[in-house]
Image: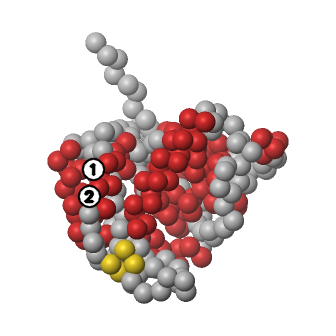
């Protein structure tokens, strides 16, 4: 028979523990659970327009779909989610940023549908650049000098950086194998911009701990955050300032 895999011990403890216990408790598994979650998201978050505006950035509210693990394991197809969202006709005046060119109400499903385009783009990049998970796409960044230490990396992994929002997100990642998209941006930029540690370490940790770990999406986004990807991000999310908007309490 198959060998019993060793249990992972918590990075916050030297005592062995069942790493998956929190994951099993948090998630409901299977297609029925996935469809239930999809309908809840479409009706309670997407329809009112909460995914279009700043509410989707809130770390203390359930304003994202949380469907990525189901799509990752094939319990729900990306096409099913895409077409279910595309059929929604609601409009909203909520926006992440004011747009003088397109004022007024917009489609409540626009941002969510674009996420599927980005998903396919990540797969295309991995197909064309198979070293995306391990080598800087902009090759000159391979010689970049990073001054962050192993101790700083370990504290980031453990959720012990001293930044409350970052630490809460990283501990959530270890406990349930997931965190919202905006939190992923914040913890990534904390690692890269403030701790000065290569994006490769962040990619490896996400690949190890996320229940929705996807090598194409993770490498594509980590490279962008590390400035070596096709879409070099021109913004930096400060771990304190970001907390004021996404977790004001």
- Percent x, y of residue 101: 54, 83
* 232 lies above or below 249: above
Tell me the quarter of the picture where residue 20 sits. top left
Q: Residue at x 27, y 67 (%)?
A: 88
Secondary structure beneath label 1: helix
- Percent x, y of residue 112: 40, 63
Q: Which mark is residue 84?
A: 2
Q: Is residue 29 left or right of residue 67?
A: left
**Visible residue check, residue 192:** no
Give the CA distance from mark 1 to mark 2.
Answer: 6 Å
Q: Residues within 10 Å of mark 2 (few under 14, many from 20)?
A: few
Nearest the camera: 155 or 238?
238
Marks 1 & 2, CB-CB < 8 Å contact = yes
Q: Is residue 53 left or right of residue 218?
A: left
Read off the residue under disc 1. Answer: 80
- Percent x, y of residue 49: 34, 76
Q: Residue at x 65, y 55 (%)?
A: 231
């Amino acid at each position: 028979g198959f060998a019993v895999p060793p249990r992972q011990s918590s990075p916050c403890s030297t005592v062995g523990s069942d790493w998956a216990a929190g994951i099993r408790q948090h998630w409901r598994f299977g297609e029925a659970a996935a469809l239930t979650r999809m309908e809840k998201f479409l009706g309670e978050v997407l329809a009112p327009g909460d995914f279009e505006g700043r509410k989707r950035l809130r770390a203390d509210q359930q304003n994202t779909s949380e469907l990525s693990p189901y799509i990752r394991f094939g319990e729900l197809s990306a096409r099913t989610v895409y077409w279910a969202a595309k059929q929604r006709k609601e409009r909203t005046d909520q926006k992440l940023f004011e747009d003088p060119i397109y004022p007024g109400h917009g489609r409540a499903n626009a941002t969510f549908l674009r996420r599927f385009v980005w998903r396919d783009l990540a797969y295309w990049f991995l197909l064309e650049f198979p070293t995306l998970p391990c080598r800087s796409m902009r090759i000159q960044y391979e010689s970049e000098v990073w001054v962050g230490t192993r101790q700083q990396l370990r504290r980031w992994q453990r959720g012990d950086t001293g930044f409350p929002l970052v630490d809460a997100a990283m501990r959530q990642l270890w406990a349930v194998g997931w965190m919202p998209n905006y939190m992923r941006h914040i913890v990534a930029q904390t690692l890269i911009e403030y701790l000065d540690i290569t994006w490769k370490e962040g990619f490896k940790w996400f690949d190890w701990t996320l229940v929705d770990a996807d090598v194409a999406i993770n490498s594509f986004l980590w490279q962008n955050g590390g400035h070596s990807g096709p879409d070099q991000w021109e913004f930096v999310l400060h771990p304190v300032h970001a907390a004021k908007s996404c977790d004001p309490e």
